[in-house]
Image: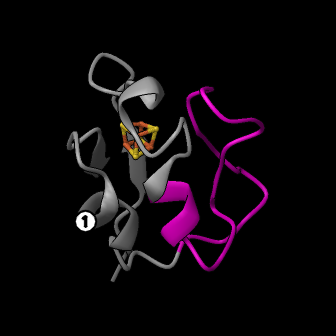
Amino acid sequence: MLKKAAMVDYQKCHPEKCDHGVCLAALECEYGNLVQEDPYEAPEINPAKWWHGCAKCAQACPLKAIRML
Ligand code: SF4
């Protein structure tokens, strides 16, 4: 069975509303699938990583900007 992958909804993602610009979703990802280069920048999906489908990032995002597809 295919595991769900995450997608960042950039209409909903507002890093300035998160913890001092730190992406809580990227912080939560222990696999490095979601990467934030610098504070106050929106996170990006790391295409080089294998997706685990745990959805911890989606749960951690206070603005519900991560969708599992
Ligand atoms: S994905 Fe969520 S937690 Fe991460 S910067 Fe965007 S709004 Fe904040």
- Where disc 1 sits, the SS reads helix
Query: Is residue 17 part of the magenta span, yes or no?
Result: no
* Closer-to-camera residue (54/29): 29
- Return the residue found at the far front: 20
- Left of 11 or right of it: where is 20? right
Q: Which residues are magenta?
A: 25-51
Can you give x and y, in whole percent of width and height, for residue 6 in the image?
40, 53
Q: Quadrant of residue 13?
A: top left
- Left of 33 or right of it: where is 1? left
Magenta segment's dominant SS is loop
Q: Quadrant of residue 43?
A: top right
Q: Which residue is mark 1?
A: 59
Can you give x and y, in whole percent of width and height, for residue 9 in the image?
33, 29
Can you give x and y, in whole percent of width and height, for residue 67 in the image?
27, 47
**Is 18 above or below relative to 10?**
below
Query: Is residue 32 part of the magenta span, yes or no?
Result: yes
Task: Point out the quarter of the image occupied by ligand 1.
Answer: top left
- Left of 64 or right of it: where is 56? right
